Image (cartoon, helix red, strand yellow):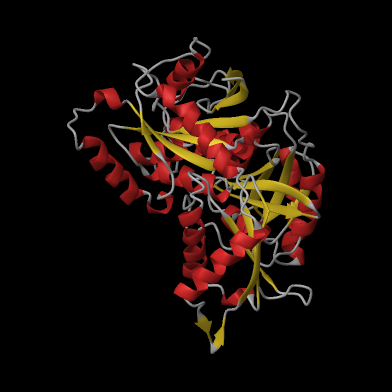
Amino acid sequence: MRKPLIALVGRPNVGKSTLFNRIIGRPRAIVEDLPGTTRDRLYADTEWNGVHFSLVDTGGLEVLEARRLQEPGDRIAPLSVTSAQYVQEIRQQAELAIAEADVIVLVVDVVDGLTSADEDVANVLRRTDKPVLVAANKADNEARAQAAVEFYGLGLGEVFPVSALHGTGIGELLDQAVAALPSIGEEEEPVPALRVAIVGRPNVGKSSLLNRLLGEERAIVSPIPGTTRDAIDTYLTWEGQPVLLIDTAGIRRRGRIEPGVEKYSVLRAMKAIARADVALLLLDAQELVTAQDAHVASYILEQYCSLILVVNKWDLIEKDSDTMEAYTQQIRASLQFLDYVPVLYISALTGQRVHKILPLAFQVYQERMQRIPTGELNRLVEEAMARHSPPHKAGKQLRLYYATQAGVNPPTFVFFVNDPELVHFSYERYLENQIRMRHSYLGTPLKLIFRRRTKEVERV
């Protein structure tokens, strides 16, 4: 079940990233006093008053086109072609967030006052039926807070004077934002045994793979990036087991075909991953791993979704007996944090090895549901400590008293310790590797939780 989504939008340099950091409570977005610093969407899961939601920080939404800035008599310096394209890309990125969001927060700057750019942004927002709130940022004193009433002129509803820098007014804004969120219920369809999301950059063959898996033309296939405009959920039965295939090729609102939009497909992938047990991350054999591939892979692991790396278009590669191993080494070097994830080389066009995808997905799913008995787990932990003693910090040594597997899907392990602050990342990774030596949990991230021991928990 996915979380509802709140998007922060607005022209550049109004403080969206600072507001994003304030709401999530940690400095996730890069904050710089230069317009256009935030180019890629940043997102995080957070909660307010018990309501859990995802928050997205967009790049500046600037709808002034280069041709408007270059009209005769315009005192504003004309944009270069590169700058115009940059502004257009940020606009498209934010429009995608608007299309996918459940609630939109328009961030404006009370110091600058109401600008024509704010008016243009408001014109874009009026085309949506989503709830829109106005956050008048930089209202750091009473005079500025009173000046925020000017933004009622946008005609978008209630205006909330806030200071992202100092944290004032944020509670009132979030109260209204979460109240406007829809309740996200369970799907009406029967829950399948396995949910598989097909994710990846545009034009890597997601729709072609869906069609090949289904054995029928259920999705439009075209070499034009972004042909699939909407995510497609398809149910099928594989060897008597129900499977839900979630195709995430669509990244645009209906009727929009614009260059540059395809770069920003993360939001729809986010929603699909949140509903999936296993994600198939498609890579292009001719390009292999790009920055966006690594970005999406990181999000998959953050959501503790299982993962299979599927290298498509393998038929286009000239090969010898060592080619596959060389490619695998290159992928492992680029995605070092995915050493436990299987890699499969396919051709959706010819069908090469496509028949191996669902069996592998079920294998990964079965390992995801694996449970280690408590006694065995504690013996494993004791042996691990004997081989590598827990670390010291400020003269104090970490002590592990007891471990138990609290759940599956994802596999969750709870370690009772003397002080969770003493757990270094490297030792956590060491314990994870020791678990994987006995139980591989193929393609599945493990969730390790460290809690302070209570009196009821005895050392094994």
Q: Quadrant of the C terminus?
A: bottom right
Residue 102 visible in rendering: yes
The reply to whether residue 63 is visible in this rendering is no
Relative to 365, 85 lies left or right: left
The answer to which image quadrant residue 254 occupies is: top right
Percent x, y for residue 284?
Answer: 34, 32
Is 258 situated above or below 428?
Answer: above
- Which residue is at a point 60% across and 25% down the rendered structure image? 243
Q: Residue at x 76, y 32 (%)?
A: 186
> Left of 192 or right of it: where is 32?
left
**Quadrant of the rendering where the N terminus is positioned:** top right
Task: State the residue at coordinates (49%, 20%).
Answer: 210
Q: Where is 410 relative to 66, above or below?
A: below
Could you say where residue 396 lies in the image, as x and y percent from the top left?
57, 86
Foreground pick, 181 / 95:
181
Label tally = 0
Question: Residue 48 at x, y = what percent?
Answer: 76, 54
Question: In the displayed image of the protein, which residue is found farthest to the top?
Answer: 216
Q: Residue at x 59, y 37 (%)?
A: 277
Pick whichever, 365 or 422, lies toward us. Answer: 365
* Residue at the extreme bottom of the image, as rendered: 395
Question: Observer-nearest residue: 155 or 97?
Answer: 97
In-front residue for pair 82/17:
17
In this rendering, the answer to whether 237 lies above or below 194 is above
**Residue 67 sits in which quadrant?**
top left
Instruction: Classify residue 441 as left or right of residue 102.
Output: left
